[in-house]
Amino acid sequence: MSRYFFDLHNGGGPTRDEEGVELNSRDDIARVIRRILLDVATDELTELQRGMISVTVRDHTGQPVCVSSLSFNYEWLK
């Protein structure tokens, strides 16, 4: 098991994870990333026509090991 940190980048600027989470596998990391992206999108993209949310995952040494993002865009055609 290793500790991973999930830094959020959204319209409000970057938020650095100082606490981290103990996880066992890449699948566990992906599950946490999906939860973060969907929770933030639900809370923050309701009033926007466009938005981008990303998460950078760092390992216990502080090195980035994964980056994931979610892009949202809608426009009326008529």
Image (tube, rainbow, N blue to C red):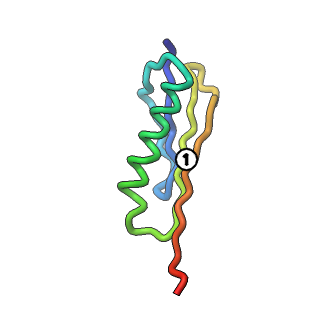
Report crowding for label 1: few under 14, some 14 to 19, many 20 or more residues within 10 A (C-alpha).
many
Q: Quadrant of residue 36?
A: top left
Q: Residue furthest top?
A: 1
> Which residue sits at x=48%, y=25%?
28
Q: Amino acid at mark 1?
A: Ser
> Which residue sits at x=54%, y=42%?
55
> Which residue sits at x=52%, y=52%?
53
Q: Which residue is mark 1?
A: 54
**Number of labelled discs?**
1
Relative vertical location of residue 50 with respect to residue 65 in this rendering, above or below: below
Q: Residue furthest front?
A: 78
x then y, percent, for residue 38: 43, 47
Q: Residue furthest left?
A: 43
x then y, percent, for residue 60: 55, 20
Q: Secondary structure at mark 1?
A: strand
> Which residue sits at x=59%, y=20%?
61
x then y, percent, for residue 73: 54, 66
On screen, residue 64 versus residue 52, left or right, reads right
x then y, percent, for residue 46: 38, 64
